[in-house]
Amino acid sequence: MIQGSVAPGFERVRDAFVENLTRQGDAGASFCAYVDGVEVAHLWGGEARPGVPWTADTLACGAAVGIGVAALVAQRLADQGKLDVDAPVAAYWPEFAAEGKGAITVRMVLGHSAGLPWFPDPELRVRLDRPETLLDSEAILRLIEAAPPVWEPGTQCGYHTATYGWLVGEIVRRITGKSLGTYLRDEITGPLGAEYWIGLPEAEHHRVAWMSPDPITDTDQFYKFLNADTPPGKAMFMSPHRRFGDMIRDGMNHPTFWRAELASRNGVGTARGVARLYAMLASGGELDGVRVVSADSTARHIEVQYDGNDFIWGNPLRVGLGYMRPSASVGMGPHDEAFGHPGFGGAIGFADPVSRVGFAFLPNRMVLALTTDARAETLASALYACLKPAA
């Protein structure tokens, strides 16, 4: 059953959402869109867990959607003059300079060119399919400090699939004295009334939808691409001899995974919460009287740092200071000025400052592809078809 509402003139969006849940076989999902700071669609339907309907309060893990949120935290600190993106990371985190990392800048970290997509971990102390290993943040930070760069920093761009969250998180903690998740709640999502967490409180665990892995993740063909010995598998901190589907079932659906703070992998929220963040950015940094960042800072942080093939995954990539930009791999509506971040499996949140759109789609049936998710594309096409031609 589809629930929620659309504003008059946006009925096509409801039709597209229905199509996703029927023809495209979604188990459950939620969608929300804002235009000019006003909510024009908020829809949900299907099952959050077997036999449990998706409701307006259901939370979903958007995986790397959280990288865009972490980028927003860094943007706010830079906008306030507390973070210099061209300073060495070691200026804030002195121990980071070990093993030839002293020249790595915050800009390199935010733009995925720092050369730290993984770190040596011969004892397998950190594995995403063993979520209890994600709670020992001090041990993880020591491993990062002791790691040499995989490539010469600043010379390649490779998606820091998991390490992005630890790197940005520690920079934020060194500056503010708060974890990234706590700072996010205190300074951004709390004032905005946006339900999105990095480090989900136990009291909210009952609201989380269970993720369903794409069947391809259990095949031999996919295992050859993503296993503990391939670059993508190293970046995902895969356990030896385990398949990606196992990581979804044993990792992403485990309460300990939701509780850990790893912005690049386990941000949890509602589609409305994500859409409010991007509606704020699309509206110049302010929503409902709450200013989070300046419009000028957004222009600086979405400036493309790299445009080419990803060193690790091989797909086309256009990236700013954490925010992804439209590319052959990531669609965000018709305007090149859009920015945001997709999540592995089909989730996405983005802002379009031209049409002043904030967009968020959170499904629990994961579909893996190196191009834009068809379900998100269906919803975006319907949304833009409802806008005035001038948009």
Image: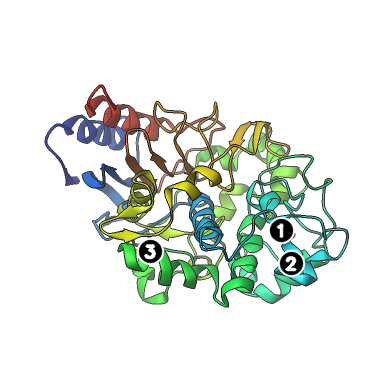
Q: Amino acid at mark 1?
A: Ala
| Image location (x, y in percent) of residue 263 | 54, 60
Q: The C terminus lies in which quarter of the figure?
A: top left
Q: How many dots with numbers?
A: 3
Q: Amino acid at mark 3?
A: Thr
Is 382 positioned to the left or the right of 135 in the image?
left
- Corner quadrant of residue 264: bottom right
Q: Real-space Cα distance between discs 1 and 3?
A: 27 Å
How is this picture coloured?
Answer: rainbow
Residue placed most toward the observer, 196 or 353: 353
> Taking the image as drawn, is residue 31 in sight?
yes
Is 102 positioned to the left or the right of 287 in the image?
right
Q: Which residue is mark 1?
A: 87
| Image location (x, y in percent) of residue 319 | 59, 39
* Secondary structure found at label 2: helix
| Image location (x, y in percent) of residue 104 | 77, 55
* Secondary structure found at label 1: loop
Q: Which sits earlier in the primary sequence, circle 2 or circle 3?
A: 2
Q: Which residue is mark 2?
A: 91
| Image location (x, y in percent) of residue 342 | 49, 43
Q: 90 above or below 322? A: below
Asked if the residue under mark 2 is in contact with the one under mark 1, i.e. CB atoms within 8 Å, the reply is yes
Q: Amino acid at mark 2?
A: Ala
Residue occupying the far left of the picture: 8
Q: Real-space Cα distance between discs 1 and 2?
A: 7 Å
* Secondary structure found at label 3: helix
Q: Which residue is mark 3?
A: 189
Residue placed most toward the observer, 83 or 52: 83
Give the class, few, some or many, for how many residues have Cα within 10 Å of label 1's Cα (few <14, many ≥20): some
Give the class, few, some or many, for how many residues have Cα within 10 Å of label 2's Cα (few <14, many ≥20): some
Q: Residue at x 27, y 32 (%)?
A: 383
